[in-house]
Image: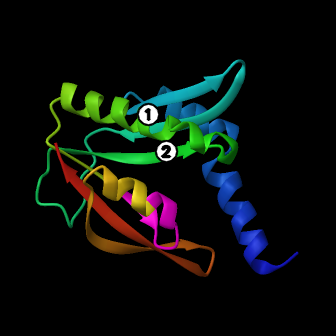
Amino acid sequence: MYRRQKNLLEFYNTYYSVSKIREELNDTENIFWIVFSDELPIGFAKLSLNITNEKLEDKNSCKLQRLYILNDFIALKIGSQLQDLILEKTIELNFTSIWLTAYYKNTKGLRFYDRYGFKQIGSIDFYVGETNYENLVFAKKL
């Protein structure tokens, strides 16, 4: 097995294990949405509350940690509906900004966040093993 594959497997086993997901689901500082089509889960989002970023002046912020939709369902605009729900919830909770990170080569994701008024405020290095995946940091005032 190649070193990069091994590092990626270790990353997934650490951050996406059943015990880690259970821990995140039970954390009251997280809000999750799961989207189903019939009985099939086709997408989910995770909002982490009261998380700031050093590049963000506003400290009354939360982080859109994850927003994923299965490729076969992207054309149905489920991501847009989910994003609308997330933004409504952040406003309801009286946050004044929301931020996120996105891989710089994720052009679909970058266009999606641009349509929602997110502006790039910086970048971070995201390592999986020795491999760096540059992520862009975006924020939106609410």
Q: Which residue is mark 1?
A: 82
Q: The N terminus lies in which quarter of the figure?
A: bottom right
Q: Residue at x 65, y 34 (%)?
A: 42
Q: Residue at x 48, y 40 (%)?
A: 79
Span of residues in magenta: 100-109
Q: Which residue is mark 2?
A: 67
Q: Quadrant of residue 122?
A: bottom left
Q: Which mark is residue 125?
A: none
CA gap, disc 1 to disc 2? 8 Å
Q: Is residue 93 visible?
A: no
Mark sitting earlier along the chain (1/2): 2
Label 1: element kind: helix
| Amino acid marked by disc 1 | Leu
Residue nearer the viewer, 82 or 126: 82
Q: Position of residue 61 (x, y in %)?
A: 21, 46
Q: Residue at x 36, y 29 (%)?
A: 85
Q: Is residue 65 visible?
A: yes
Residue nearer the viewer, 66 or 43: 43
| Amino acid marked by disc 2 | Leu
Q: Do the numbered discs 1 and 2 sit on residues whose CB atoms are within 8 Å?
A: yes
Q: Is 95 left or right of 109, judged from the image as shown?
A: left
